[in-house]
Image (spheres, grey):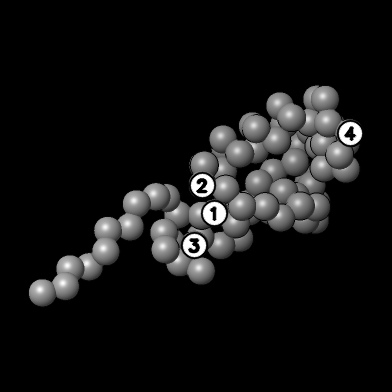
Amino acid sequence: MASNPVIIGRATLIYALQDAQGRTRYIGKTIRTLSERLAQHRRAAHKSKLPIGRWLRKNPNASIILVERVEVGGD
């Protein structure tokens, strides 16, 4: 008798960073909560020379929204 495989892990969240007008600037993915990921982006932006870091410094009211949730084992 075959048993179902046990899948260990967390769902992957596809998210967008948006400016105050709702324009999307960045799409990313994470297994953290969206608030944790946004905080991580903001901390990294202080020293970052990457475009997203510069954009976040200029857009302190940027928000994060869920685009899609991919369940564990999903594609």
Q: Which residue is at 69% across, 43% downward?
A: 63
The alpha-carbon separation of the residues under discs 2 and 3 comes to: 10 Å
Residue placed most toward the observer, 3 or 69: 3
Mark 2 or 3 closer to N-term? 2
Residue under label 3, please give it: 70
What is the three-letter code of the residue carrying label 1?
Answer: Leu
The alpha-carbon separation of the residues under discs 1 and 4 comes to: 25 Å
Q: Are marks 1 and 2 in contact (CB under 8 Å)?
A: yes
Crowding near the residue tagged with mark 2, few <14, some 14–19, many ≥20 C-alpha atoms within 10 Å: some
Mark 3 or 1 closer to N-term? 1
Residue under label 1, please give it: 13
Name the image quarter holding residue 13.
bottom right
70, above or below 65, in the image? below
Residue under label 2, please give it: 31
Mark number, residue 49: 4
Crowding near the residue tagged with mark 1, few <14, some 14–19, many ≥20 C-alpha atoms within 10 Å: many
Residue placed most toward the observer, 72 or 4: 4
